[in-house]
Image: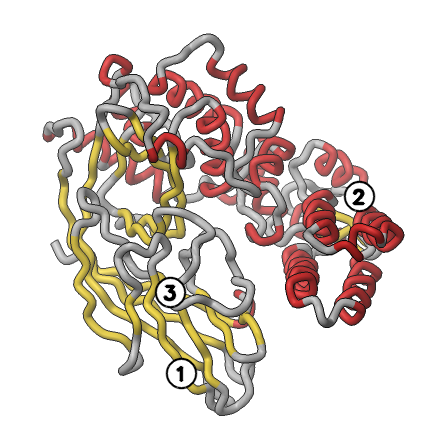
Amino acid sequence: MNLIRYAILFILLIGCNSCRKDLNVKNEIEEAIELGEFTKTEHLLNEQIEKNFNNEELTKAYRIQLETISRIRKEFTLTQGDVLERLEPYFPGVTGTDLDKWEEAKQLEMRIIDGEKRYFNRSVSNFFRLNKEAKKRKESLDGKGYDGVEDFQQNVIPGYFEKGIEQAIPFDPKKIKVNYTIRLKPNVVPDRETVKCWLPYPRIHNQRLPEVEFLNASQEEYIIAPEEMLQRTVYMEKTAIKDSATVFSISYIFHTSAQWFGVTPDQVKPYDKSGDIYREYTAERKPHIVFSDEVRSLAKQITGKETNPAEQVKMLYYWLNDNIPWAGALEYSTMSCIPEYVLENRRGDCGMQTFLFLSMARSLGIPCKWQSGWYLLPQEKNLHDWAEVYYEGIGWVPVDISFKLIDSYNEKIKEFYLNGIDSYRLIVNDDFAKELYPKKKYYRSEPYDFQRGELEWEGGNLYFDQWSYSMEVEYLD
């Protein structure tokens, strides 16, 4: 239960003398969280909100924690019966004892909520990824599922090198049209109330995304965030109509290219440790870039006596490839420290793997940063996060942790995503947890990343379960 507990402790300790003195309340909340007593915790938090109604900062923090508990409930809706039913076709006669064993092995994600076992909504699909026997059984019955990323890697990346590519020179240019739509469900917001919407929009990258052409928007009035905003948006407002969905949409064309650096250790110069880049991008940035004892010791254990940044990054990449499999993730807003979660559970999605990589690399004094948006491969499209590493004498180099090593005897192909990126990347973010434009009033549905969008109205934030998003993609060349 540490994911909530740490956030509670933070709330109770922030600049408020009365909170520091009220140790009994703190201990009671801590104990309730530890026991998974969410209803009791919600009651205690509501009491504190009422008690501290004139302390805006503190009550806001308590409300965020109440929202976090609500979001966790939505993440863990499966009962033991639900899980047994879904596993029965593959494990005839499966029992609760079997589930206990898989839970202990960190292969079936569960938590106790108000005295009952509740399983993560994606726990079963993740189980078939994490348990080798389960994966084998599923494939024997259902066949091997199609993997669009693997298809792309095996059929496209080798062609890059067959055609001949130069280090650091953008290549394989693409022109991609996107229609992006957000649809708020009917009657979520009262009739005639104003809904505010932030939609994801491409962020210019001089080499890999040099141009964007805005085509149209569903509303006559809209605000495109300035290019310097690190999480880029298009903002619109619309009046909700009773019994009707509230729809926002934008269309644009962006130009993109692939890039491969083929970094070798001898190309990397010593860092200017007094420079702005080094100081900013080797810093700890809690809660999700952390230099805990475990992160530091693991990074040093993986890299040993190696001191060359290119070799260190390669060692970290190979370790993550071999030890942290991809799995469907909890919403990031429900996790207090993503790298710690990944290390404890030995799994994570693209962003979770990236946060662990950033933490380990920065702890070694290697400047690196977050980048995210979507991958829009012809075979498959999805939300995606990756990293960039700064090498002195070379510049910023993309490092895609979750696209992993490609199955190839050619080392350049195998390690393509260690220091390269394909030409199907929609870059929306060059950092995480930055203010949107214009500033959002309420706590975001995703306070760190920004890929799906954000909505709110005067009554509060509108969470992901209250609206849907869709993307239509057209390849123009």
**Which residue was labeled with disc 2?**
96
**Which residue was labeled with disc 1?**
238
Horizontal side, residue 426 vs residue 352: left or right? left
Q: Quadrant of the N terminus?
A: top right
- Indicate which disc residue 437 carries: 3
Horizontal side, residue 67 vs residue 282: left or right? right
Instruction: List x then y, in percent, for residue 93.
Output: 75, 42
> Count of labels shown?
3
Residue 370 picture quarter? top left
The residue at the point 45 percent across, 41 percent down is: 350
Instruction: List x then y, in percent, for residue 101.
Output: 75, 34
130 or 217, nearer to the observer: 217
Residue 418 picture quarter? top left
Q: Amino acid at mark 2?
A: Gly
Q: Are marks 2 and 1 in contact (CB under 8 Å)?
A: no
Instruction: List x then y, in percent, for residue 109.
Output: 67, 43
Above or below, 122 relative to 404: below
Kindly report which numbered mark, 2 or 1, lies closer to the viewer in this rendering.
1
